[in-house]
Image: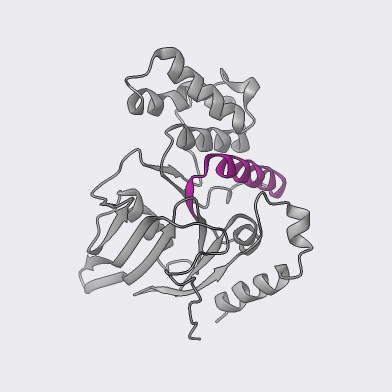
Amino acid sequence: MTNTPHTTPDTERDPHGFEKYMLELSNLTKVYPTPNGDFVVLENLNLKIKEGEFVSIIGHSGCGKTTLLSMIAGLNPITKGEIILDGTPISGPGPDRGVIFQSPSLLPWMSAMENVQLGVDKVFANATKKQRQDICKYYLSKVGLDGAFDKKAKDLSQGMKQRVGIARALALKPQVLLLDEPFGMLDSLTRGELQDVLLEVLDKEKTTGIMITHDVDESIFLADRVIMMTSGPRAQIGDILDITYSRPRNRKAILEHETYYKNREHLINFLEH
């Protein structure tokens, strides 16, 4: 099935009022050499994401979603093309990009506070000790961990660990937040709670976000646009769906909105072809 992307033209104001481009991916290509020749994961992928915009990326397993995210994070070298962040080409990882993985990989012997503070101490080295602690406490509180500052990571539930992971990434005050299936390992109730937490923090901080997910409903609820990837190899962007619900968002209102099931059907039809 050939899908025609329906992105908002560069000359127009998009439905959410975003204007400045924060992230620009130009002719992005990733090739892995193998004994049987080059394996092209992504080929000539182009995408522009505006400041404050939150996009989700969906597609079948193996289409290069995680590869794409790791390239934006600076953890995976670019074969061809470039990624420009706020006007500057990226050349490696940096605190301007916060990453939240499916498993937060906390240091189990450290407290929630200490896990967040590891990055904060490096990024805000010129701040006072109290200022750095206040940053950590603020973001841990924002994700609902007021009473767990001193709890060891090994004693936290999976949902609480993921909250620490979100706080750790946001505390660095990144320009772009990158999320790789952050709620994939959680039960449905905890997943819904953390989606609400993420929405609340992103709306307040106006952080630009890119999230990989297999969950169509999660894409619709969280994103301003859903980026649909073609199947690999040589994956590209097959379609883009604008999600025009206003913010802040209410889950019940979105589920009852007349366009919700139309959007859902559009995404599922893409994935099924």
Q: Nearer the viewer, residue 102 or 166?
A: 166
Q: Which residues are magenta?
A: 188-212
Q: Left of 3 or right of it: where is 97? A: left
Q: Which part of the image, by quadrant, shows the C terminus? A: bottom right
Residue 110 visible from this viewpoint? no
Q: Position of residue 110 (x, y in %)?
A: 47, 21
Quadrant housing residue 48: bottom left
Q: Position of residue 9 (x, y in %)?
A: 45, 72
Vertical order, 34 against 20 (above or below): below
Which secondary structure type mostly characterizes the magenta part of the structure? helix
| 247 vs 97, nearest the viewer | 247
Quick one: which residue is furthest to the bottom in this view? 1
Q: Residue at x 50, y 54 (%)?
A: 53
Rendering coords of residue 250 (x, y %): 73, 51
**Towards the viewer: 127 or 28:** 127
What residue do we see at 65% from left, 71% from top?
263
